[in-house]
Amino acid sequence: MAGESPKPRSHGMFQPRASARPRPLMPGQAAAGAFRVKVLTILPEMFPGALAASLTGKALTARIWSLEVLDIREFAGNKHRTVDDTPAGGGPGLVMKPDVVAAAIDHAQADVPEDRERWPVIYLSPRGRPLTQARVRELAAGAGLTLLCGRFEGVDQRVLEAREVEEVSIGDFVLTGGEIPAMALIDAVVRLRPGVLGNAESIEEESFSRGLLEHPHYTRPQVWEGREIPEILLSGHHAKIAEWRLSQATRLTKQRRPDLWRAHTSDEGAADGDRELSDAPTSATKGGQTKDRER
Ligand code: 9D3
């Protein structure tokens, strides 16, 4: 029956397995101040996936953030655990049912702060507003996130409106579902939480905030396959090196991202947050396939 929320056999929270004796990690035990992420998906086995590795994985084990994965199928009302149906008006594919998706969202939101500014519900969708670093920063400043991963053609429009769901895309290319985009978003947000990045990575953040692409990087050996490290980088002349890096960053940005270059030059006085990847259409091939080494 519609309106009756089923008792889900929850996949529960991800249990870190790095420690010798993993203890059950219940929602009530999320570390104080930890950033909480809830994921609604019909493919719960995809999580934590790549998020268990590297910086995000260490931060998960350290309880800087927590992950709760909910299987949307658990909220289906019938024996067959049906989550989709044919599109009204005809056409190919299937649409995720509003009652099932609403039950999953309502269950996820039951124990979270009302303030949607600090805990939005986001639907990863190819027709969403493109994700930007500015939005990532806002999300990282909140308390948590509920992410709805789409499969099939999409979700019934009425549930998106009724539950005030924000639609977000990660770029103009077609994937098979919203799970990998959800992981990309989580990765982008979690790395901005205190304690996730070391000093080296934090410095990298600064250079990107100027709104330019990064300059090329080199390391030893000094000659590799007959290719030398640019002489200036070995000179020890720090002012000249900074100047060279800026000129390279400028050249690459003009060449690969004319949209970013325009933003960089047109609002010289704007705050970094307004400039950095703010409204850049992600069309890497728009300018044609010019070789990077060409000017
Ligand atoms: C035939 C119309 N298709 C839209 C382009 C349907 C469709 C294709 C692929 C519907 C969903 C999907 C699966 N993609 C996502 O769920 C998705 C996505 C993406 O494909 N690209 C970039 N960002 C995202 S966020 C979610």
Image: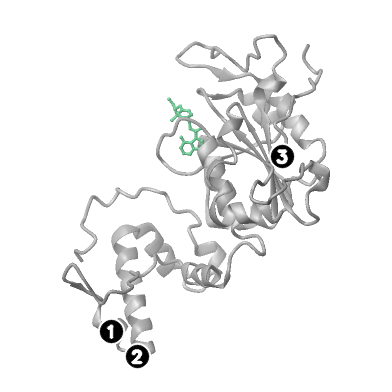
Q: Please identify the residue farthest to the top as the structure is shown.
A: 79
Residue 176 or residue 281, whichever sits in front:
176
Height in image: 12 above or below 281? above
Height in image: 192 above or below 186? below
Query: Which mark, by number, is residue 13?
Result: 3
The amino acid at mark 1 is: Ile
Query: Which mark, by number, is residue 237?
Result: 2
Q: Quadrant of the C terminus?
A: bottom left
Q: Quadrant of the N terminus?
A: top right
Which badge, 1 or 3, is on the more N-terminal residue? 3
Q: Determine if residue 102 is in view.
A: yes
Q: Position of residue 69 (x, y in %)?
A: 67, 35
| Label 1: which secondary element | helix
Residue at 24% x, 83% y: name it: 231
Task: State the CA–CA distance, disc 1 to disc 3.
Answer: 51 Å
In this picture the colour scheme is: one colour
Q: Quadrant of residue 48?
A: top right
Query: Which mark, by number, is residue 232?
Result: 1
Q: Nearer the viewer, mark 3 or mark 2?
A: 3
Residue at 54% x, 56% y: name it: 133
| Label 3: which secondary element | loop
Q: Position of residue 189 (x, y in %)?
A: 60, 53
Q: Nearer the viewer, mark 1 or mark 3?
A: 3
The amino acid at mark 2 is: His
Under 8 Å from ligand 1: the CB of mark 2?
no
Mark 2 surroundings: few (<14), some (14-19) or many (≥20) residues within 10 A: few
Height in image: 245 above or below 196? below
